[in-house]
Image: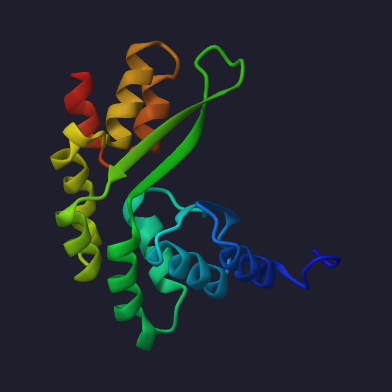
Amino acid sequence: MGTDVLDFVSALRAAVRQAPDVLVVGEMRDPETMRLALNAAETGHLVLSTLHATDVSSAVSRIVDSFPSERQAAVRQELAMALAAVLTQTLIPRADGTGRVPAAELLVVSYGARQHVRRNALQHLHQEITITRKAGSFTMEESLARLVQQGAIERGEAMGRSGHGEELEGILGR
């Protein structure tokens, strides 16, 4: 940056022209970066990127909401076709106080998830995770429960991080 290219957007544009198999975009912070990453994914490149979000639906929402309202329907359509998977993670203090351990949620994108993204019915993506378990998807609650059962994190910490407390309680048992 500053030597080979003027800015991050110029670098990303130049990288796509080099016909890479995989593009790694550190963090998508602005609509221009998101647009370029989405365009690269649409043209068959595997794009791996990060952004700050608490769960799968908020990650998708964050991307779409970064664009002007008149463009959001088109972005939802493009995103629905381009997504292969959405992974979220959070770091949770270990029960023994020796650091942190990651808890995660993974949606392997299926036809149903694509439809929910297109229709802006993101509240249904959590259900899509449970439907696509055989493909490898798992909920944050499943991840949290596993960490509690292993003794890695405290139950109360898991409950505080869960967006679906009743589901977590059901997995852990009362």
Picture quarter with the N terminus: bottom right
Residue 163 visible to an observer of this rendering: no
Q: Is residue 165 left or right of residue 28?
A: left
Residue nearest the observer in this picture, 107 or 103: 107
Residue occupying image coordinates x 25% and y 41%: 164
Vertical placement of residue 104 versus 99, above or below:
below
Residue nearest the observer in this picture, 102 or 163: 102
- In this view, which residue lies farthest toward the right? 3
Vertical placement of residue 69 versus 95, above or below:
below
Instruction: Tell me where residue 29 appears, x and y as whole percent.
Output: 58, 64
Vertical placement of residue 162 versus 48, above or below:
above
Vertical placement of residue 129 versus 118, above or below:
above
Residue 166 visible to an observer of this rendering: yes
Instruction: Tell me where residue 112 appears, x and y as whole percent.
Output: 14, 55
Q: Is residue 141 left or right of residue 90?
A: left
Q: Is residue 156 left or right of residue 32?
A: left
Q: How many marks?
A: 0
Residue occupying image coordinates x 77% and y 69%: 5
Picture quarter with the C terminus: top left
Residue occupying image coordinates x 65% and y 71%: 9
Q: Is residue 115 left or right of residue 51?
A: left
Q: How is the image coloured?
A: rainbow
Instruction: Tell me where residue 42 appears, x and y as whole percent.
Output: 38, 66
Q: Give the quadrant of residue 65.
A: bottom left
- In this view, which residue lies farthest toward the bottom? 70
Instruction: Tell me where residue 76 appears, x and y as whole percent.
Output: 31, 71
Q: Give the quadrant of residue 155.
A: top left
